[in-house]
């Protein structure tokens, strides 16, 4: 429980910090970079190094690469739908979330099967 | 287009939006740890790049732009949507940086100290993301939409 609380507080602070950076920067397309900041990774990996060791971190980071590729496709898709459609940003970004799950988990399946 | 700071946008953010970000960020970090603990680091690692606060972020941007247009008597619906789309495209460029961050950490986690690995990974994220942004902003098709 203590571990969870520590990660919760650190994660909240790091995510908020990056979000504020993204908010004060212009143009919007540059500020958008902060939407994909490694905030959760930074908050998590420091403690993971300490408690689980470097090998554990390396395994997490390898999977994180797949999550990042899935995020790239997902964010681009959301941008395209918003640019061309009439839907709300919240609706589009939530409805497109299965894309992230499908890509990242199928990528992990391929990695574990063929690597 | 020149990169600049606009501190006024901090005033546009409401208190509950700051609280929501903190809670979402904290929850996502905590949940990523629980998933890694329960299902192992291979599955847990995926969630280090989960777009947890992305929906809330694009929605806030859309609302801010719409509100600022409404204050001067215009319908800011399409401008809000355009701003959210630009933010999403920016995030997709940032994901290239996120990929570089993860790649670097994967390759060097076992070779160097944790602080060195994380600091260099973060630097790489900034470099790759900024390079991606510069390439896109000099790409003729991208220039048209970068006005916000």
Image (cartoon, coloured by chain):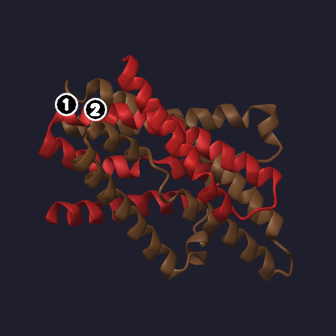
Q: What element carries label 1?
A: helix
> Residue A79: x, y in percent?
70, 49
Chain hosting mark 2 = A
State the residue at coordinates (61%, 76%): B12
- Residue B108 tag number: none
Q: As rendered, which of B89 and B42 lies closer to the eye?
A: B42
**Neighbour class for label 2 at 10 Å: few (<14), some, many (≥20)?**
some
Q: How many labels does the image show?
A: 2
Q: Is residue A37 visible?
A: yes
Q: Is mark 2 on a helix, strand or loop?
A: helix
Q: In which quarter of the image is the N terminus of chain B?
A: top right
Asked if labels 2 and 1 share a chain, the reply is yes
User: In this rendering, is residue A108 above or below B21?
Assistant: above
> Residue B108: x, y in percent?
27, 26
Q: As rendered, which of B12 and B44 lies closer to the eye?
A: B44
Q: Label 1 belongs to which residue?
A: A55
Decide: marks 2, 1 in contact (CB < 8 A)? yes
State the residue at coordinates (72%, 69%): B65
Q: Can residue B97 be seen in this view?
A: no
**Neighbour class for label 1 at 10 Å: few (<14), some, many (≥20)?**
some
Q: Quadrant of residue A25?
A: bottom right
Q: Label 2 belongs to which residue?
A: A59
- What distance separates the C-alpha of mark 2 from that of mark 1? 6 Å
User: In this rendering, is residue A73 above or below B84?
Assistant: above
Chain hosting mark 1 = A
User: In this rendering, is residue B14 above or below B4?
Assistant: below
State the residue at coordinates (35%, 30%): A62
Q: Which chain is brown?
A: B
Q: The red chain is which one?
A: A
């Amino acid at each position: 429980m203590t571990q969870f609380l520590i990660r919760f507080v650190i994660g909240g602070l790091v995510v908020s910090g990056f979000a504020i950076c993204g908010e004060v920067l212009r143009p919007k397309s540059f500020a958008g970079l902060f939407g994909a900041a490694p905030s959760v990774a930074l908050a998590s990996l420091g403690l993971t190094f300490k408690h689980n060791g470097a090998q554990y971190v390396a395994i997490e980071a390898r999977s994180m690469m797949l999550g990042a590729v899935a995020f790239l496709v997902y964010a681009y898709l959301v941008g395209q739908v918003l640019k061309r459609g009439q839907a709300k940003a919240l609706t589009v970004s939530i409805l497109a979330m299965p894309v992230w799950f499908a890509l990242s988990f199928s990528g992990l399946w391929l990695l574990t099967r063929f690597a | 287009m020149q990169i600049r700071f606009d501190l006024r946008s901090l005033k546009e953010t409401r208190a509950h939006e700051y609280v929501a970000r903190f809670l979402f960020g904290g929850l996502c970090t905590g949940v990523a740890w629980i998933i890694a603990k329960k299902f192992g680091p291979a599955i847990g690692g995926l969630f280090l790049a989960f777009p947890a606060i992305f929906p809330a972020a694009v929605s806030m941007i859309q609302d801010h732009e719409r509100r600022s247009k409404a204050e001067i008597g215009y319908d800011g619906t399409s401008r809000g949507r355009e701003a959210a789309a630009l933010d999403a495209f920016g995030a997709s460029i940032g994901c290239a940086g996120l990929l570089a961050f993860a790649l670097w950490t994967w390759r060097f986690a076992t070779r160097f100290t944790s602080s060195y690995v994380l600091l260099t990974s973060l630097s790489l994220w900034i470099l790759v993301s900024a390079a991606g942004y510069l390439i896109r902003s000099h790409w003729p098709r991208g220039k048209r939409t970068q006005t916000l």
